Amino acid sequence: MGNFKSEAAALPVLYGDTPTLFGKPFVRAQDLLGQADVAVSGVPWEGTITWGSWSGCELAPRTIRQASARYTGFLPEYGVDAFDHLRLVDTGDVALDMQDREQSFAAIEERITRIAEAGVFPATYGGDHSISYPIIKALSEQRQGKLGVVHFDAHYDNKDEYDGDRYARCCPFRRVAELPKVRTRSMVHLGIRGPRNMKEQQEYAESIGATTLSINDVRQRGIDAVTEEAHRIASEGTTGVYVTVCSDVLEAAFNPGGPADPNGLTSYELYRGLHYLGQQPNVVGFDLVEVYPPNDPNGVSSHTAVWALLHLLVGMAQRKGTR
């Protein structure tokens, strides 16, 4: 990251030495109306641990913001600066109580509802993947019509429960499928691979009409074709598409601060897919979850997470700039 203090010295600070994302203004969610196109929130939630002592993702909103201090909004590969066309603000972290899942999820819903009511695009950094459920719940309740989902992940995350917890990080897309305003036939799991999935999870996805686009589909057909198909399916019978990314959709070599799942997407493939989705006018929200800073001593995964959002934003900026 270089000399963080000198790079971030002139940036607005949320708390301690943590700057706002990209050094953009801090705006409270209740004050958003007319001030922004995109509002970033941190959700430092970690619920039930599902693998040994593998934890620490609640720290990621801080390390991702710190990583962003290095960057502008300009991507030379597209010749576009996202912030020439988009007003981005940081609404800070949602206030959570790690001992009270129900209260914490209600706080997440309230934050996303306020952002959506202001007509602003919500971009969220977690936290574990369970946070996608209250985010999607809030957005679906704000919409006329149903919501589709494009879910980048190595795993289905659609178990009914884990050790008695129906809201663990391996369960959110079972809960999402139960939401009345999510169209299950417009749910797409993209990048699925590996033996941490169970046959029953694939069978459940098939039973509700969700689509699986595995790593083999990406390798055989290419990320462009697969992402376009994912978006087309998620758009069928819906009025909006939500995009959610687990860091472990990436090949482990590209994601040292994530679970050790090999045979995944390259960072190029993830960014290419997100850039395409950012160009689509019916994409209504985004999250990226499960970066584990304690396992990421050089901050690579936090930087990767910043770049992921930036590629989506550049796609959005290109769409807005051509209107």
Image: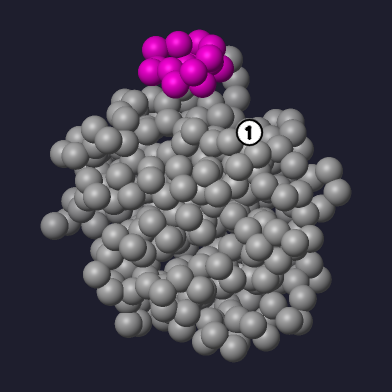
Residue 73 at x, y percent in the picture: 36, 37
Residue 201 on the magenta segment = no
**Residue at the spot 44% in from the left edge and 21% down from the top edge:** 14
State the residue lying farthest toward the left: 323
| Disc 1 residue type (three-letter) | Leu
- Taking the image as shown, residue 21 lies to the left or right of residue 219, namely left
Range of residues picked out in magenta: 4-18
**Residue at the spot 24% in from the left edge and 37% down from the top edge:** 32
Front residue of 104/92: it is 104
Residue 31 at x, y percent in the picture: 24, 33
Q: Is residue 164 visible?
A: yes
Residue 126 at x, y percent in the picture: 55, 44
Residue of label 1: 59
- Taking the image as shown, residue 316 lies to the left or right of residue 178, namely left
Residue 291 found in image quarter: top right
Mark 1 crowdedness (10 Å alpha carbons): few <14, some 14-19, many ≥20: many
Residue 152 found in image quarter: bottom right
Residue 11 on the magenta segment = yes
**Residue at the spot 38% in from the left edge and 18% down from the top edge:** 12
Picture layout, residue 156 above or below residue 302? below
**Residue at the spot 81% in from the left edge and 53% down from the top edge:** 51
- Taking the image as shown, residue 8 lies to the left or right of residue 290, namely left
Residue 71 at x, y percent in the picture: 44, 31
